[in-house]
């Protein structure tokens, strides 16, 4: 029995959910999203809740996953998802024009990435070191934020690089000066 898969998903006010030909369509104030249903699963929409039902016990491993993806889609079209990244380092900065993001990260060249459709990227205009990635698809937002972070992950000595806001970086002590015991003349 799947504990997560059997939980009903509450449909918030202002969100419309429809099922047709193994495709679920979600529509809310933040946008639209559609998702394929795995074979062997049925969705039942009743009294403002979505129930995920499986037809065979062999599908037990995917039951909770499908329910979580549907819950994330409902939350995404009603509230949206957001990841905030910080760029830490001397001279490190970013700028965006809506279609691409360009970052100066201490390399010999600026790093430019295309922003995928369905994602909105904003850079704080004052400091140019806080990047906000937002959208309705949780998976797409998380993957793009991770792609940005992997360009220059935070290093453990100075802590410079790209990190999630609030992320704790474990710092290492640098080389220490050896006192005494040197070569005698």
Image (cartoon, helix red, strand yellow):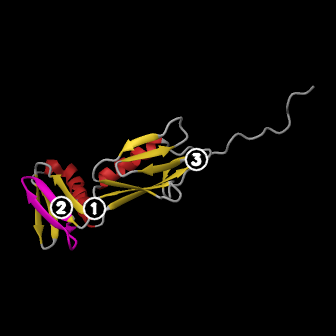
Magenta-colored segment: predominant secondary structure: strand
Where does label 2 land, which residue?
A: 26
Seen as rendered, the residue at the extreme left is 21
**At x 10% / y 50%, what residue is drawn?**
40
User: Callout 2: helix, strand or loop?
Assistant: strand
Where does label 1 land, which residue?
A: 76
Mark 3 neighbour class, 10 Å CA radius: few under 14, some 14 to 19, many 20 or more: few
Q: CA distance from mark 1 to mark 2?
A: 9 Å
Q: CA distance from mark 1 to mark 3?
A: 35 Å
Where does label 3 land, which residue?
A: 91
Q: Are marks 3 and 2 in contact (CB under 8 Å)?
A: no
Is residue 168 shown left or right of residue 4?
A: right
Which one is nearer the viewer's eye here, 121 or 140? Answer: 121
Marked residue nearer the N-terminal end (1 or 3): 1
Find residue 183 and report its horizontal and vertical position in percent. Answer: 87, 28
Q: Are marks 1 and 2 in contact (CB under 8 Å)?
A: yes
User: Callout 1: helix, strand or loop?
Assistant: helix
Q: Are marks 1 and 3 in contact (CB under 8 Å)?
A: no
* 83 is within the stretch colored magenta: no
């Amino acid at each position: 029995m799947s504990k997560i898969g059997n939980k009903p998903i509450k449909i918030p006010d202002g969100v419309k959910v429809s099922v047709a030909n193994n495709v679920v369509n979600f529509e809310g104030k933040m946008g639209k999203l559609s998702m394929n249903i795995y074979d062997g699963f049925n969705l039942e929409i009743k009294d403002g809740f979505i129930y995920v039902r499986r037809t065979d016990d062999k599908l037990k491993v995917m039951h909770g996953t499908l329910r979580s993806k549907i819950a994330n889609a409902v939350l995404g079209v009603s509230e949206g998802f957001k990841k905030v990244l910080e760029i830490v380092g001397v001279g490190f900065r970013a700028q965006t024009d809506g279609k691409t993001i360009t970052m100066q990260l201490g390399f010999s060249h600026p790093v430019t990435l295309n922003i995928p459709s369905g994602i909105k990227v904003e850079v704080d205009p004052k400091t140019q070191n806080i990047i906000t990635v937002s959208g309705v698809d949780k998976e797409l937002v998380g993957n793009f934020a991770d792609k940005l972070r992997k360009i220059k992950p935070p290093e453990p000595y100075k802590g410079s690089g790209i990190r999630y806001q609030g992320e704790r970086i474990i710092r290492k002590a640098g080389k220490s000066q050896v006192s005494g015991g040197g070569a005698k003349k």
